[in-house]
Image (cartoon, rainbow, N blue to C red):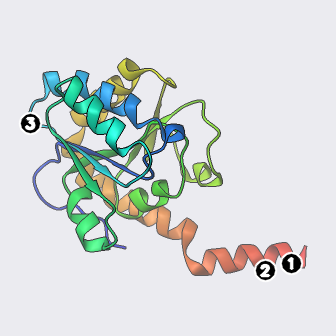
Amino acid sequence: MVPCRGRVAPTDFIYVGRLVASKKVDILLHAFRLFVAVHPESQLHIVGTGDQYAMLQGVVRDHSIPGVTFHGHIAELNDLRAIYDTCVASVSPGYVGLSVTQSFSLGVPMIISRNEPHSPEIECVVDGVNASFFETDAPASLCGEMESWYGRAGQHDDRAAAIAADCKNRYSVERMVAGFVEAVNA
């Protein structure tokens, strides 16, 4: 995949994944409510479906949170890339799954909840380089990390290529086959 940068500094954030309780998207919505009060130009893109879809839309409505778009499921990579292209960072308010490698492959850093039962993909995270952590279940802490990445948005073009290259090096077919062969020969 090619990193999706090369234009004006991004202003938005994205969540891609299932809309279920364990993903804690409500924490992200409350953090974004704090963030957008200071940065009204920012948007939050929610990509995915799940049993909390209607409840999360209710949180947005009940708290009058501006700038939140629920896209539903997006299957086309180019459509997803167009959204990632506007984003400062992706966010994982619950446990990290495969979306971290997708975000990194597109050159977009991720903000991650610190104390979750993360999937094995967490091993590709380098704190301060391609990701940062916030205190679990703390919207104010998440908002602080959003502020931090937003303040460095102009540097993301330079960082995007490095994030994408690192992901490609770790998750190429050749690297995975080499790891498998090494395990079999051990």
Q: What is the C-alpha distance between the residues marked 2 and 1?
A: 5 Å
- Using a 10 Å C-alpha cutoff, classify the residue at mark 1 as few (fewer than 14 neighbours), some (14 to 19) or many (20 or more): few
- In the figure, is residue 154 to the left or right of 138? left
Disc assigned to residue 181: 2
- In the figure, is residue 30 to the left or right of 135? left
State the residue position of label 1. Answer: 184
State the residue position of label 3. Answer: 41
Q: Can residue 126 be seen in this view?
A: yes
Q: Position of residue 23 (x, y in %)?
A: 49, 41
Q: Is mark 1 on a helix, strand or loop?
A: helix
The amino acid type of the residue labelled 3 equals Glu
Residue in view at x 48 percent, y 62 percent: 166
The amino acid type of the residue labelled 1 equals Val
Point out the tag, 3 or 1, that comes first from the N-terminus: 3
Instruction: For marks 3 and 2, give the one nearer the viewer.
Output: 3
Instruction: For marks 3 and 1, give the one nearer the viewer.
Output: 3
Residue in view at x 14 percent, y 22 percent: 38
Q: Quick one: quadrant of the C terminus?
A: bottom right
Q: Which of 120 and 170 is in front in this view?
A: 120
Query: Image height check: is 153 above or below 62?
Result: below
Q: What is the C-alpha distance between the residues marked 3 and 1?
A: 52 Å
- Is there a contact, CB below 8 Å, between mark 2 and mark 1? yes
Q: Nearer the viewer, residue 137 or 130?
A: 137
